[in-house]
Image (cartoon, rainbow, N blue to C red):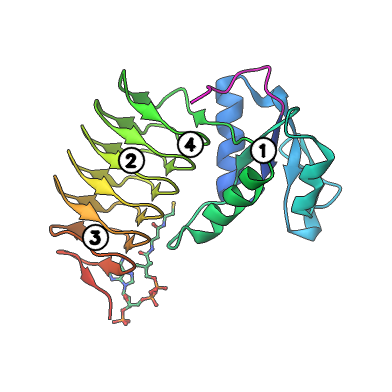
C-alpha cells in the first residue's frame, strides 16, 4: 500500500452514503484539501457541492480529463449485498492505468505487519489484528473487528460492526453483513453474501446468500 498523504490529488467517485463517509475520513486525516472534487451520477447534484467539495459532474468519463499520473481515485461505492458494482468501478479505471488511494481512518487500529492492498479502505473504529492480509479494493467498515490471521481477498466488504474471527478466509467479492459474526477458521466462497446479524458456524460455498442464526442459505 502507498499510504494516502497530503501531496496526492484525489477524485472521489460517488457522493452517496459511503462517499460521504470517505469524505469525513479525509477530513479526519487532514487530507481533505487534496480532494479535487466528486463525480456523482445523481444529476441533481451537478454544480453543487458535497460538504465544501465541488461536484465535478455526473459522468465517470470526466476522470479522463485528469491523466493517471496526476490523480488518485477513491471508490465511493459501498455495498449492502453484492459487491459487484464496487468491483466493476475499480476494474474499469485500473484497466485505464489509474490507481486508487488507500484510506485508513486515524481511529482504526491496524496491527503492525498487516498487509493492506491497493485502494483498501479501513473506516473509523475498525480493528485489524496481527497476521491479516487485506486485498485490493477491500472495504472494512466502521467498527468491524477482524481477528488474527484472517485472509481477505480483493473486493471484499466487511460491513459495519461485523466480527470475523481468527484464521477465517474470505474469497474475492464476499460481503459480510453488518453485525454478522464468522467463527474462527471458516471459509466464505467467491461472491457470497452473509446477511446482517448472521452467525456463520460452517464454511460457505461460492455464490450463495446465507442469513440467520446459525446461518443457512436463503431459499
Ligand atoms: C441477506 C440480504 C442480502 C438479503 O437481501 P434480499 O435478497 O433483498 O432478501 P429479502 O429482503 O427479499 O428477504 C428474503 C427473506 O430473507 C429474510 N432475510 C433477509 N435478510 C435477512 C437477515 N439478514 N437475517 C435473517 N433473515 C433475513 C427476509 O426476512 C425474507 O424472509 P421471508 O421470505 O420469510 O419473508 C440482506 O437482507 C442483508 O442482510 N444485507 C446486508 C446489509 C448490510 O450489510 N448493510 C450494511 C452496509 S454498510
State yes or no: Cβ of the residue under disc 3 lies below 8 Å from any atom of ligand 1.
Answer: yes
Q: How far apart are the alpha carbons under marks 3 and 1? A: 36 Å
Q: CA distance from mark 1 to mark 2?
A: 28 Å
Residue 141 locus on image (x, y percent): 42, 42
- For marks 4 and 1, give the CA distance: 17 Å
Along the line of sight, which residue is nearer the eye, 40 or 27?
A: 40
Please check the rendered image and state whether residue 6 is part of the magenta-colored stretch, yes or no. Answer: yes
First in residue order: circle 2 vs circle 3: 2
Q: Position of residue 138 (x, y in %)?
A: 44, 42
Other-residue count near label 1 (Cα within 10 Å), few / some / many at <14 / 14–19 / ≥20: many
Q: Is the residue under label 1 in contact with that under label 3 (CB below 8 Å)?
A: no
Marks 4 and 3 in Cβ contact (< 8 Å)? no
The residue where tag 4 is placed is: 121
What residue would you read off at disc 1?
98
Q: Which mark is residue 144?
A: 2
50 vs 206, nearest the viewer? 206
Residue found at x 28% / y 59%: 189
Identify the image quadrant of the C terminus: bottom left
Where is ligand 1, by quadrant? bottom left
Dot label at residue 198: 3
Q: Secondary structure at mark 1?
A: loop
- Which badge, 1 or 2, is on the more N-terminal residue? 1
Q: Residue at x 72, y 23 (%)?
A: 33
Q: Quadrant of residue 216?
A: bottom left
Cβ of mark 4 under 8 A from ligand 1: no
Mark 1, mark 2: which one is toward the viewer?
Answer: 1
Viewer-nearest of labels 4 and 1?
1
**Range of the magenta residues?**
1-9
Amino acid at each position: 500500500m502507498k499510504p494516502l498523504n497530503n501531496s496526492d490529488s484525489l477524485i472521489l467517485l460517488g457522493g452517496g452514503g459511503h462517499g460521504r463517509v470517505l469524505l469525513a475520513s479525509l477530513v479526519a486525516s487532514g487530507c481533505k484539501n487534496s480532494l479535487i472534487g466528486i463525480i456523482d451520477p445523481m444529476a441533481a447534484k451537478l454544480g453543487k457541492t458535497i460538504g465544501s467539495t465541488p461536484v465535478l459532474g455526473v459522468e465517470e468519463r470526466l476522470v479522463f480529463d485528469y491523466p493517471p499520473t496526476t490523480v488518485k481515485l477513491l471508490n465511493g461505492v459501498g455495498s449492502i449485498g453484492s459487491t459487484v458494482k464496487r468491483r466493476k468501478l475499480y476494474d474499469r479505471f485500473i484497466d485505464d492505468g489509474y490507481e486508487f488511494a488507500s484510506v485508513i481512518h486515524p481511529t482504526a487500529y491496524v496491527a503492525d505487519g498487516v498487509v493492506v492492498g491497493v485502494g483498501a479502505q479501513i473506516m473509523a473504529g475498525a480493528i485489524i489484528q496481527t497476521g491479516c492480509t487485506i486485498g485490493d479494493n477491500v472495504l472494512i467498515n466502521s467498527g468491524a473487528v477482524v481477528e488474527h490471521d484472517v485472509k481477505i481477498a480483493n473486493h471484499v466488504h466487511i460491513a459495519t460492526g461485523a466480527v470475523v474471527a481468527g484464521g477465517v478466509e474470505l474469497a474475492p467479492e464476499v460481503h459480510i453483513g453488518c453485525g454478522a459474526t464468522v467463527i474462527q477458521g471458516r471459509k466464505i466462497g467467491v461472491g457470497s453474501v452473509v446477511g446482517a446479524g448472521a452467525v456463520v458456524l460452517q464454511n460457505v460455498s461460492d455464490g450463495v446468500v446465507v442469513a440467520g442464526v446459525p446461518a443457512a442459505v436463503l431459499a
